[in-house]
């Protein structure tokens, strides 16, 4: 009986903690050539950690550059959540000044291996 109650409470605790889990955060200041590994269907918070506005932020899936998200002006501290359902490469690109050169962060969405 005690074992059954313990298992039920443990299961309930896991579901409650999953419901309250915060998304993994991506800092746009970490723009680099090596793709950042992201797990498929994981909630990701994309946050402007710069002290300035970012312009023309887009999330795309190369090689077709289909826009998944587009933000014309991304304010300091502003963020949005996103999850990638399809495996593969993605890019988050933005400009630090309006109509200037763009910086891109490459993402590689991979399947999470079963434990």
Image: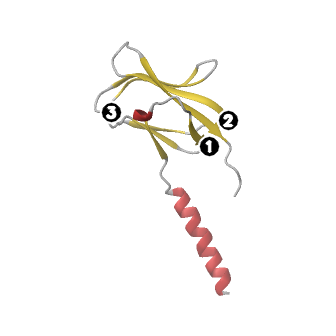
Q: Is residue 4 left or right of residue 29?
A: right
Q: Looking at the rendering, in which quadrant would you find the C terminus?
A: bottom right
Residue for badge 1: 41
Please say whether residue 70 is visible from this viewpoint.
Answer: no
Q: Earlier in the sequence, mark 3 or mark 1?
A: 1
Q: Residue at x 71, y 54 (%)?
A: 114
Q: Residue at x 43, y 23 (%)?
A: 94
Assign a secondary structure to mark 1: loop
Q: Please name whichever residue, 89 or 5, is drawn nearer the observer in this view of the structure.
A: 89
Residue for badge 2: 87
Q: CA distance from mark 3 to mark 1?
A: 26 Å
Q: Residue at x 37, y 13 (%)?
A: 100
Q: Earlier in the sequence, mark 3 or mark 2?
A: 3
Assign a secondary structure to mark 2: loop
The percent position of residue 17, horizontal first and vertical second, equals 52, 62
Q: CA distance from mark 2 to mark 1?
A: 9 Å
């Amino acid at each position: 009986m005690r074992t059954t109650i313990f298992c039920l409470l443990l299961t309930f605790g896991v579901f409650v903690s999953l419901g309250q889990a915060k998304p993994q955060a991506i800092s746009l200041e970490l723009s680099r050539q090596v793709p950042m590994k992201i797990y498929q269907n994981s909630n990701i918070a994309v946050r402007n950690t710069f002290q300035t506005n970012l312009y023309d932020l887009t999330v795309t899936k190369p090689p077709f550059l289909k826009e998944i998200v587009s933000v014309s002006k991304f304010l300091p501290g502003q963020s949005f959540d996103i999850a990638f359902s399809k495996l593969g490469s993605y890019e988050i690109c933005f400009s630090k000044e309006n109509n200037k050169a763009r910086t891109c962060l490459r993402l590689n969405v991979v399947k999470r291996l079963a434990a």
